[in-house]
Amino acid sequence: MSDTPYLIVHRSADELGGNCIEIGDGNGRRLILDVGIPVETPDSERKKIGLPTTLDTTKPVDGLLISHAHQDHYELLDEIPERWPIHCGKATGELIRFTRDYQARGHSRSKHKPIAVERFAAPWKDRTPFAVGSLIVTPFSTDHSAFGASMLLIEVGGKRILYSGDFRRHGRQSHRVDEMLEHLEDTTIDVLILEGTNIERESTAVSEQALEDRFVEMLGDARGRVFVFYSSQNIERFLTIFNACRRSGWQFVIDLYTAEILDMLASPENGLPVPCPKYGRHLRVMWTKAQVRKNIISGREDFNARMLNPSVGTKPAFMNAPRCPSVILTRESLIDEFASADIVPTPRDIWCWSMWKDYIDRSPQAKKWFTDHHCRYEYMHTGGHAPASDLQAFAERIKASIVIPVHGDNLDAMREKLPNVRRLVNGARLELT
């Protein structure tokens, strides 16, 4: 034991995602930042990934902090000791618990089990410091494709460590990053743990607002239906598409899974639209048999009843001849359901991919379905991570004595673009003297 605070990057020093970082005071008090798996882990290997072998799970941990609800930051929650308290923001906790619960619905053999709410500490509040053992943590809401994402300032042994988590500055919450930079303007930061997803890769930094305008242009040019692929937990992308539909006089047709996420997250503070008669003209919910059945098995009949209201919901078969122009949420798992309802795409329709391009290979059935029917293809996306220029500008504003790159597949490039970069290897201990 010593009085010297330390930092260990157990995973993500050389890979894209899978963050797992330990910070301690040198006297046995420590916290862990995130427990994910690398983004590019093949589906066949995901179940084989465990906690990093350098992470000692036999000794006490005062808290596990989850920066946001993406699986490359929380996927291994099932592996941590139950005595470790979990800290995160309100929306992050809700999304994690919902995802785990949904994965387990109707699947008694599912690897993922629901996570008891009792394991979570009270949700942190933006810019409000709280103690994790001897360490003081201050969360700052940030801009990312995960709703409710945070950066974290950790104070330990007279040192200040800023963990960027994942962030960008071209989303609808970009002002959050600017506000945090202003808040920390006169604060000395000793260590910046900085994500480097786009430090050397191509990055599209189109703003979400500009993307909304592009959707409006596409809808104005469309001759039939638009089938759109996007992540239902990307709330900013939902707003981009929903706003474009309202501006264009179209309706956005979502599934029960997406509707349940919106219903859970909406509050007077964030003003998220939820499926209800108020929005019935522009937001509808399709009643897919598999999802209705899954909700019945899990005791969610009350939610089904609200969504099956004719002023809110619609049967998939109605998508063959919708009463008004329609953008229809689509994913690989819905293709069979569409086919059973005799929904057949035509050359007049558009299929639109609004996610990372590399993910398209995970939807081979859907890709074949649309290409076989000669549908027009559109790629409409902007990333959830800051481009290299924004990473540089951010680091220049923080002026940290040490910059530790994580969450990237070519992090050596940071040395060429940023000052004070210290590359670590996974599992190495850095004493903060």
Image: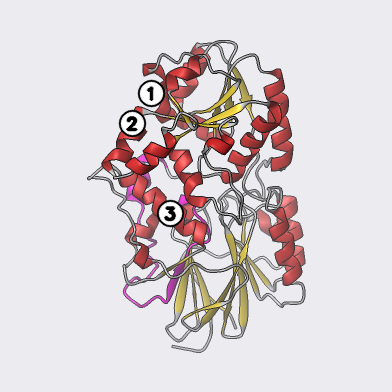
Q: CA distance from mark 3 to mark 2?
A: 22 Å
Evaluate whether residue 380 shows in this view: yes
Residue 335 horizontal side relative to residue 262, left or right: left
> Residue 345 appears at what percent x and percent y?
51, 14
Q: Please name the amino acid that badge 1 sits on.
A: Glu
Figure check: 13 above or below 290: below
> Residue 131 appears at what percent x and percent y?
51, 80
Task: Identify residue for label 2.
Answer: 290
Q: CA distance from mark 2 to mark 1?
A: 8 Å
Q: Which residues are magenta?
A: 42-71
Q: Main secondary structure of the magenta part?
A: loop
Task: Identify residue for label 3.
Answer: 96
Which of the 4 image quadrants contains residue 228? Answer: top right
Contact between marks 3 and 1 (CB within 8 A): the answer is no
Label 1 sits on a secondary structure element that is: helix
Q: Please name the amino acid that badge 3 sits on.
A: Ile
Figure check: 15 above or below 359: below
Q: CA distance from mark 3 to mark 1?
A: 26 Å
- Residue pictured at 52% horizontal, 38% vertical: 276
Task: Identify residue for label 1.
Answer: 337
> Residue 338 appears at what percent x and percent y?
42, 21
